[in-house]
Image (cartoon, rainbow, N blue to C red):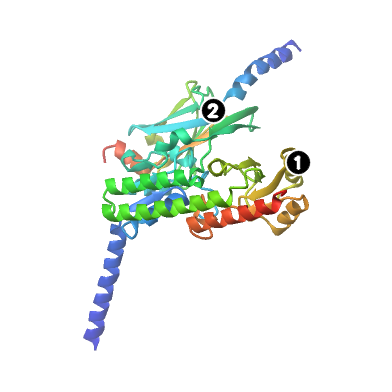
Amino acid sequence: MRAFFRLTSVLAAFVLTTNVVLAQDKPQVIAVNYPLQYFAERLLGDAAEVVYPVPEGVDPSFWRPSIADISAIQSADLILLNGAGFATWTSRVSLPRSKLIDTSRGLADQFITTESITHSHGEGGEHSHEGTASYTWLDLSMATAQAQAIADAIKARELADATDVDQRMAELAKELQALDVAAGEALRDAGDIVFIATHPRYQYFARAYGLTIISLEWEAGAMPGDDELAELEALAEENGARVLIWEAEPPASARDVVASLGLKDVVFPPLNATSAASQSFAASFSEAVRQLHTAAADASPG
Amino acid sequence: MNRVKALLVALAVIAPTIAGAHQLNVFASVDCQAVLVEAKFSNGKHPVTGEVRVLDGESNLLTTLELDADGTSRVPLDSVDHSSGLVIEVDVGSHDDYWIVTPEDIARKCGS
């Protein structure tokens, strides 16, 4: 009996060790935002571990990693960047060029330059910063091109079987195209509606579907203050806006106040972070479009 | 009174330059002897003064240096415990930025 237990223990230890070794042996891919993580996972299957390194609740655009985080990222097999100025930390560290893929590199001619934001801080006086809109994946044709860049990088580095990757990419592209067509149809009549977003996240989405989306600079998920609500009211009146897009679910009382201003509202997480997507990328995008369609239809004067 | 006027005139002249300034970018490289820090605004100009803070992997402040007039600074590696890597923060008053140096960055440059 004792011999049986000893043998079982040895076997159990062997199985555990093997699993650990297998887990460690898997190539590691770093994705700087949720869409890239989603695309990489779809394309790689079980062939590699895809890691989104940003802690929950932290905006990946402005995450400040620790030295240990960067050490871990430097040792990854592939590092997927969004480009278009997304994730400022990526330009404040040394990342191995051979492992870097800027997934929007081929899309530079489609980038949207953001308006200057005049502000002041410290003793520097009032000044402005011009930048590039970063949320490229909300234009699904750009998202598809980014996914293709990931597929090409995976194949070039032989991180997964090339035939499998091609097949998965074809499925993903088909799925994204279907989403794009459905969104186009759902928002076909929304071109006359003016939307206001609580944060400038939707530039590529607006361009893709011919929408007018004006942006505020509100904190995600927070109760807007009196000044902010006054700004919203003035902006809505000035532009004839009828729908407010929340970047994240606000307090219920905030939605009540917005309704009292005569605005319809929807919550449209821009899907930048894993925690911002309650469902998969495709399902979250589809749900946001459905809500926008309903709000636009309700707000339509006809 | 004249001095106050002169100061106000000087500030009026300087203010547009500051207002035109853009983001601060910090870059640091390692040559095994030191970390070489370079700070530059996105419009290509460099700050002439500023504070360089050097922190370790636990965010403990190791040393503080002044930025040189050409926007650079040099942190001798033997002057700080760099075993857990270094975070270089540059603060020029109106803007700040950082650069992260990992232990692997240092080891790579020192041939180990």
Q: Residues within 10 Å of mark 1 (few under 14, many from 20)?
A: few
From the image, tell me which residue sits under label 1. A237
- Say which residue label 2 marks: B50
Q: Residue furthest bottom?
A: A1
Question: In the image shown, does A218 or B38 lie closer to the viewer?
Answer: A218
Tell if the residue under mark 1 belongs to the same chain as the one under mark 2: no
Helix or strand or loop: what does disc 1 sit on? helix
Question: Could you tell me if residue B59 is visible in this image?
Answer: no
Relative to B74, is A260 above or below? below
Residue pictured at 66% horizontal, 53% vertical: A297
Farthest-out residue, front: A302
The disc label shown at residue B97, or none: none
In the shown orientation, is residue A233 left or right of residue A179? right
Within 10 Å of disc 2 (Cα), the crowding (few <14, some 14-19, many 20+) is: many
* Residue A206 location (% of width, % of height): 57, 42
User: Could you tell me residue A99's position as x and y percent?
Assistant: 33, 43
**Residue A209 x, y percent position in the rendering:** 55, 44
Residue name at image x 72 percent, y 48 percent: A301
Residue A88, how many percent across, how many down?
A: 49, 40
Which chain's residue wears label 2?
A: B
Q: Is residue B10 visible?
A: yes
